[in-house]
C-alpha cells in the first residue's frame, strides 16, 4: 500500500503511478517502479493527474519547478494506463 499525494488515500501499489526525481533534479514517470531517486505516487485516475497539474503537486513534493509539459505527459500516461486496465484488467 502507498499513499496518493494528491488525495492522501492509500492504494495498492498496482493502482498507482510512481513519479521519481533523480539526483540531477530530473522528474520522470517511473514505469518500472524501480528507478533510483525520490518517488511519489498518484492514483491511476485522469482526474487525479489533472488535479496534480492544477495544484502543481509534484513541484511541492520535490521542492523544484516542474514544467507543465511533464504534467501533460503524466495525464496522457495515466489515461493510457487507465484505458488498458479497463480493457484488459491487467493493469499493465
Image (cartoon, rainbow, N blue to C red):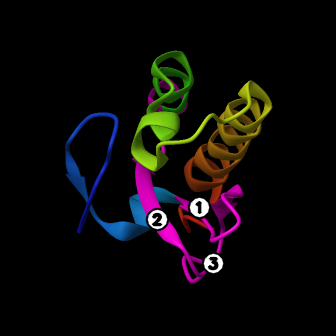
Determine the CA span between mark 1 and mark 2.
6 Å
Query: Which residue is painted at 51% across and 26% down in the image?
Result: 56
Query: Which residue is painted at 47% across and 49% down in the image?
Result: 62
Query: Which residue is painted at 50% across and 40% down in the image?
Result: 58
Q: Is residue 55 above or below residue 23?
A: above
Q: Is residue 57 above or below residue 9?
A: above
- Give the image quarter of residue 30: bottom right
Is residue 24 located in the magenta-colored stretch of the structure?
yes
Residue occupied by mark 1: 21
Near mark 3 (Cα within 10 A), the count class, few <14, some 14-19 or many ≥20, is few
Is residue 67 located in the magenta-colored stretch of the structure?
no
> Can you tell which mark lies on residue 70?
none
Query: Which residue is painted at 48% across and 24% down in the image?
Result: 47
Determine the CA span between mark 1 and mark 3.
14 Å
Percent of width and height locating residue 2: 27, 63
Q: Which residues are magenta?
A: 19-48
Residue occupied by mark 3: 32
Name the residue nearer the viewer: 9 or 57: 57
Name the residue nearer the viewer: 38 or 53: 38
Name the residue nearer the viewer: 4 or 81: 4
Q: Residue furthest top?
A: 54
- Give the image quarter of residue 10: bottom left
Residue occupied by mark 2: 39
- Residue 27 in sight here: yes
Percent of width and height locating residue 43: 41, 46
Quadrant where the image shows the N terminus: bottom left
Of callouts 2 and 3, which one flags the residue occurring earlier in the amino acid sequence? 3
| Callouts 1 and 2 close, C-beta under 8 Å | yes
Disc 2 versus disc 3: nearer the observer: 2
Percent of width and height locating residue 91: 55, 64
Quadrant where the image shows the C terminus: bottom right
Q: Secondary structure at mark 3?
A: loop
Amino acid at each position: 500500500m502507498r499513499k496518493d499525494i494528491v488525495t492522501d488515500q492509500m492504494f495498492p501499489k498496482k493502482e498507482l503511478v510512481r513519479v521519481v526525481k533523480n539526483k540531477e533534479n530530473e522528474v520522470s514517470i517511473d514505469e518500472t517502479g524501480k528507478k533510483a531517486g525520490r518517488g511519489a505516487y498518484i492514483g491511476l485516475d485522469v482526474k487525479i493527474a489533472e488535479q496534480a497539474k492544477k495544484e502543481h503537486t509534484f513541484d511541492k513534493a520535490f521542492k523544484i519547478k516542474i514544467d507543465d509539459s511533464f504534467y501533460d505527459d503524466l495525464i496522457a500516461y495515466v489515461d493510457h494506463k487507465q484505458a488498458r486496465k479497463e480493457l484488459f484488467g491487467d493493469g499493465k
